[in-house]
Amino acid sequence: MTAEAVRMPATTAFGRGHVHAVAGCYFVASFAALGLPPYLTAILPELGDRQARWAGVLYVVPTVFGAVGAPLWGRLADRHGRKRLLLRAQLGLAVAFVLAGWADSLATFTLALVFQGILGGTFAASNGYLGAALEGPALSRALTLMQGSARAALVVAPVVVGSLSGWLSPHRQYVLLAVLPLAAALLLAALPEPGPAAVESAAGPEAFTGEPPLVSLTALYALEFAFVFCTVISFPYLIALVDDRLPGTSPALSGLLFALPHLCYLVTALAVHAAFRSRPLTGIALGFACIALGLAGHAVAYSLPALIAVRLLLGAGLTLGLVCLSILAADCARGRAPGGMFGSLEFFSKAGAVAAGITAAAGSARFGPAAPVLVGGTAAAATVLTTLVPPLIHRTRRSR
């Protein structure tokens, strides 16, 4: 094992392989959830919405209902077992996907997306499961790996769905991809039920001194909301912005520009975790600063090299933010019921995504495709200033 390897009691037997299994199960289970929504404009005409007028609304339906259900499922996990509720989330996704794939009306398809939000929640359930078994740097590293799974699925899934579209319509692919969460549930069934965490890492025993967390839960939730809002707001209309700045750009190149920040995370996340493990607040401030500069740069980038540069700058902010939020979340999880905490954290994450989608739609309709990145950049700059005000973010650690 590496220096950061997990050492658990024999009764728990929870190690790196288990963490990788949980992350892998999330990756495969999220394929339909992340890969099919971009194709709603192709799915809805089959269900009677010829102009796909409901695509924007339906895009956020699973997110809205996922936000509503996440805190409840988290508390139930703490009460009835994290493994049991993680299996429930995977099976719930499978049921929702089958219903969506066989839907023959817009109403039934919408109901399936509602079920996907309510019955899913695999990310929060996976984090709650890991939070019950790991602690400190081992947990933050596992959460960083989970975010890597999400980024990888976000990059790969739309490409796979598009490649399969020549043989099977995106609508019917919901049924096919329901096999993935079922397979994930079978693998997760073989994992142990996590017990109380007992972790040692390269950080040494000083990492677990019983000191209060660096930030309060309120501050953590606020940072999560702000981070998701600032980053997601640029997603829906990025392709339109690229087409506006570089007319005639191929779909493949537009897709690569969209994926660059996520690829940046996949390449650098573990190195960033090692560098900022002991100073996450600095990383958060730097992350929001990079996001602010990157999004502002989108408004003045009129060439391919300039767009690549600002996308990479946004990727640096995305990586710093996600990694340092994982470190802060692991810090807050010590001594708390992880299911409830990660369920609530997921609520604020999804709330930030919904707010970003609504703001992006309104801003783009009124001011054009550059409006979302300007709004997101302004919000990120304001958050940088907030992170520099100690009374709002810091909790002074007790002196030893």
Image: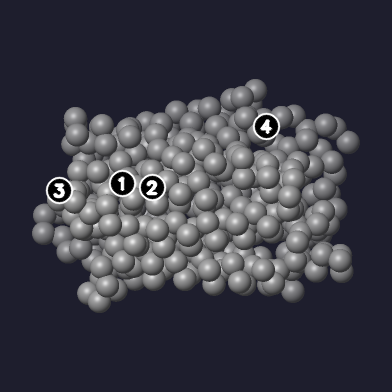
Label 1 to label 4: alpha-carbon separation: 42 Å
Marks 4 & 2, CB-CB < 8 Å contact: no
Sort mark 4 into few (<14), some (14-19) or many (20+) by Cα contacts within 10 Å: some
Say which of 105 and 318 sits in front.
105
SS for dot 1: helix
Q: Earlier in the sequence, mark 1 or mark 3?
A: 3
Residue extending farthest to the top is: 391
Q: Position of residue 271 (x, y in %)?
A: 58, 61
Front: mark 2 or 3:
2
Side (left or right) of 188 relative to 383: right
- Give the spatial CA distance, label 4 vs label 3: 46 Å
In primary-sequence order, the first of circles 2 and 3 is: 3
Q: Position of residue 108 (x, y in %)?
A: 34, 50
Q: Given this view, does label 4 or label 3 mark the residue nearer the observer?
A: 3
Q: Residue at x 35, y 62 (%)?
A: 101
Can I make out residue 36 in this image?
no
Which numbered tag is attached to residue 107?
1
**Label 4, on which residue?**
216
| Quadrant the N terminus occupies | bottom right
- Which percent across, then down, holds residue 222? 55, 32
Q: Which mark is residue 111?
A: 2
Are the two marked residues, 4 and 3, in contact with CB atoms closer than 8 angstroms? no
Q: Earlier in the sequence, mark 4 or mark 3?
A: 3
